[in-house]
Image: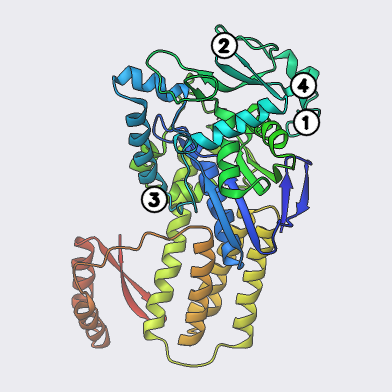
Amino acid sequence: MRIYNTLTRRKEEFVPLTPNEARIYGCGPTVYNLIHIGNALPLCVFDTLRRYLEWRGWNVRFVQNFTDVDDKIIRRANEEGVTSAEIAEKYIAEYWTDAKGLNVKPATVHPKATETMDEIIAMVSALEEKGYAYEADGDVYFSPKAFPEYGKLSHQPLEDLEAGARIMVGEVKRDPMDFALWKAAKPGEPSWDSPWGKGRPGWHIECSAMAKKHLGDTIDIHGGGADLIFPHHENEIAQSECCNGVPFAHYWMHNGFINVDHVKMSKSLGNFFTVRDVAEAYGYEPIRFLLISSHYRSPFNYSVEAITQAKSALQRLYTCRENLEFAIQRAPSGDITPQQQAILGERKEEFIAGMEDDLNTAAALGAVFDLVSCINIKFLGESASKEALEAALGLFNELTDVLGLLYNKPAADEEDFSALLAERAEARKAKNWARADAIRDELKAKGYRIEDTPQGAKVVKL
């Protein structure tokens, strides 16, 4: 598999630290609100990467954190008159609702910053002892200028990064580039005991400590949105490599930015959508389909037209599965032909080729729809044997499951229409067109239509 590595700015063959094992860290949400479409993109992208690697026989250890102590959480808690812990737990629960709706598998581990405090303090202490960090009035700051490779992920020279740096009110750091590893406690904020007095961690050190605790000093893949490249991921590299003395992550994968109607999504512009908002209008599955329908590194555009098209495309996939299941119940036994085997093999290889090329889910989806066309023509259209249809359904289910799609099984019909269909067949055989039409109209009134297929008539919900 080839992956575009943000660190080297080129596609590279994915060679893990341990053969057929992948250690992946994905930056999770800061839990102070419902997740938005921008949060959902990396969730679905890296869930699909994990699913694909596991499908190919890899052992994947996937870690996704919850940032559960942060300025935004504290601000939200103060606004609502509750504790930061209550806000964090509330929105972690809300996260699980949306993640389940998007069919995102739980990570191997979901660490919380507040449960990693010993490791965070140990890491900050090590950086201070090695001379990369210093204490000032209870705060502890990291000095990027002490790390010669600072800027290697964002590919920006230090002098360019310095131009945008500044010292905020209340900060006592030596240089505008320095960033906080530990913040001295303020009244009304959550705090923990430390060698520098009561305080709480800075954002960047949290992820470094959680990755080290659960994946080791060096990991295979670190993922997240392109907005995290600088400063978050740049700072993670600096503090982790200075502390541990080894490379932090060999591959860095970043998904593109989110636009709404071709304009950058922003609360100030009023084009900000939570996953819950969109799901209430269109359902969760069309969101997932839309998010993986383009290459993950491309700018992603959300619009009503796009989500509507995603819903229609999904229905085509559901229809294919339903038609296969219907045909299998009525098909005669027999062999799968060499031509049919070749068709399935070619579509599978086409799917794999797309996924192996930097997780090109757009190409992989194209292979799935090519498979649908082949099924309609060469399997359903030619009255294939039961065994051939089962092989087609098996591959179809495999590929859609890798993409995390078709996870909403339709509810069983409350009524059994087999008797009506049998009566209609007898009426048509006797050329009693009036009765056949009456049965059709009766079903239509109940919200169904009759579809005649080579395998017989079936009832489909309107």
Give the residue drawn at x 56%, y 23%: 182
Q: Are marks 1 and 3 in contact (CB under 8 Å)?
A: no
| Residue denoted by label 3 | 100
Which numbered disc flags the more N-terminal residue, 4 or 3? 3
CA–CA distance in space, label 2 to label 1: 33 Å
CA–CA distance in space, label 4 to label 1: 15 Å
Which numbered disc flags the more N-terminal residue, 4 or 2? 2
Looking at the picture, does residue 161 appear above or below residue 362?
above
Classify mark 3: residues with Cα within 10 Å, few (<14), some (14-19) or many (20+). Answer: few
| Residue denoted by label 1 | 155
Q: Nearer the viewer, mark 2 or mark 1?
A: 2
Give the residue drawn at x 42%, y 65%: 319
CA–CA distance in space, label 2 to label 3: 44 Å
Query: Where residue 223 sits in the image (x, y, percent)?
Result: 61, 43
Give the residue drawn at x 49%, y 86%: 387
Please give the label number shown on residue 145.
4
CA–CA distance in space, label 4 to label 2: 21 Å
Please indicate, yes or no, whether residue 435 appears anywhere in the rendered image: yes
Quadrant housing residue 150: top right
